[in-house]
Amino acid sequence: MNFLDASAVLLTLAALFAYLNHRFIKLPTAIGIMLIGLFFSILFILLGDTLPVISAAADHFVEGIDFDTTLMQGMLSYLLFAGALHVNLNDLRDQKGLVAILASLGVVLSTFLVGGAFYFLFPLFGYQVPFIWCLVFGSIVSPTDPVAVLGILKSAKAPKSLETKITGESLFNDGVGVVVYLALLGLAVSSGGHGTEVHEVAGEAAHHDDHGSSGALGIAKLFLVEAGGGILWGGLLGFISYYLLRSIDSYQVEVLITLALVTGGYRAASAMHISGPLAMVVAGLMIGNHGRLLAMSDVTRAHLDKFWELVDEVLNAVLFLLIGLELFVLKLSAPAVTAGLVAILIGLCARFLAVSLPVNILKRTRDFSPGVIRILTWGGIRGGISVALALGLPKDSDYRELFLVMTYVVVIFSIAVQGLTLGPVVRKLVTSKQNEEPEKA
C-alpha cells in the first residue's frame, strides 16, 4: 500500500473514531481514539476464523505501515515543534534545574534501574537476555512522551510551575532518550549480541559507535555529539527563522517558513547524525517566545497558533490510532505479556526513584508543590516514542518480539490508566490555594 492510500485509510479511521469518542464515549480525544482502535484490533483478531478476509486485510494493512519510520522520521518533528511552541521560556528557565536533571540523569538512571532489574527477572519468565540488551529495553521504556501528556495535563488544571516541569522534561527527554537508546543499541549490536540486521535507527547507532573507543566513553561521545549538536542546530535554525520572520509581515509566508524549518531542519539533523528531536524543541522554544513576541504581528501570531494547533491535533489522532492498531503486528505470548505487566511496576518504581533524587536535593534551596514527586511519577507517561524505539530494533534480534510486547503493555497501561487518572491525582494532591502559591526561583 502506497503512502497516499495508507494516509487516506488512517485519516478516515481517525476521523471516524474521533467522532465516536466525542459523540458517545467522551474521553480525551487521543486516548479515546487509541482505545477504540485497540478494541477493533482485538475484535478482528478474535474474528479471524469467522471473517478471515477482513482480518487478513486489516493485518496486511497494519503490517505495511512502518510505525518507526512514520513517527521517528515523520510525525515526531512536527509534534515536538508544536509542543515547544507554547512553552513559556521564562517559566522553563525557572524550572531549568529540575527539568535538566530529569531529562538527562533521570533518563539514564531509569534506564539502568529497569535494565538491571530485568537482568535478574527475565530468567523467571524463561528468557536469557544479556545485560546490554536489558539496558536497551530500559532505554526504550524510560523516556516520557510529551504528546501523550500535554493535553491531559492542561485539562487537569495543574499549577503552572508543575505543568512546566512535566512539559519541559518530556520535551527534552525524548531527544535524550533516543540518544541513550542509540548508544546502547550500537553497543549491543557491535558486541556480537543477537541480531545483525540493523534498521536505520540501529544503523545510526552502529555508525556512531564505530568511532567510540568503548563502553561508557563511546556513549559519552555519542551523547555529546548527538545531543550537543542537536541543541546547537536547533538554535541556528531558530535564529535564521527568527530573522526571516522579522523581516516580513505576511502570515502565509511566515507559516510556510516554520513548516520548512521543521521539515527541512529535522531531515538535515538526521543526515548529520545529530538529535533532530532536540533541535525541534530548541527551535520551537525560540520561535514560540522571541519569534512570537518580536517578529510577528497579531494576525500572524493568531494564524501560526491555529495552524500548529491543528497539525498537532491531527497528527496526535493518527499517532494514537496507530498505537491502538499496532496490536496486529505483535506475537503475544503469556510469558511476554506477564513480563510486560511486571515492567509496568518496575518502570513506575524506577521513575519514582529518578524523580525523588533530584527533587530531594533541590528541596534544600527551593519549595515544591505538594505531592510533586507522586505527580511527576504518575505523569511520566510512555507513548509512541517507546513503541517506535521497540519497532526500530534489528528485525533478526532474538529479543525484538519480547521487547515489543512488553513495551506495548507498558504503553497501553501508561496512556489508558495513568493518562485518564492524572487529572484526579493532580486535583487531589494540589489544593486550589496552593495552586496560586509561586515557587522559589
Image (tube, rainbow, N blue to C red):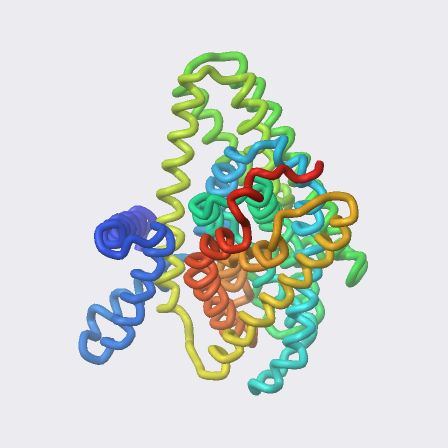
Q: Is residue 327 above or below residue 276?
A: below
Q: How far across and down, in percent of the image, does residue 358 sit?
A: 73, 53
* 299 sits to left or right of 140: left
Give 237 or 39, whichever is nearer the viewer: 39
Q: Is residue 381 above or below residue 46?
A: above
- Report the number of discs: 0
Q: Quadrant of residue 162?
A: top right
* 82 sits to left or right of 25: right
Q: How far across and down, in percent of the image, does residue 421 sit?
A: 45, 59
Quarter of the figure with the C terminus: top right
Q: Residue at x 21, y 68 (%)?
A: 54
Q: Is residue 197 above or below residue 276?
A: below
Q: Quadrant of residue 299?
A: top left
Q: Quadrant of residue 285?
A: top right
Q: How far across and down, in percent of the image, does residue 373 sit?
A: 63, 56
Q: Residue at x 61, y 32 (%)?
A: 89
* 432 sits to left or right of 239: left
Q: Is residue 366 above or below residue 373?
A: above
* 57 sits to left or right of 77: left
Give 439 or 128, whichever is nearer the viewer: 439
The answer to whether residue 174 is visible is yes
The answer to whether residue 200 is visible is no
Q: Residue at x 58, y 23 (%)?
A: 290
Quarter of the figure with the N terminus: bottom left
Farthest front residue in view = 433
Q: How far across and down, in percent of the image, does residue 24 sit?
A: 22, 55
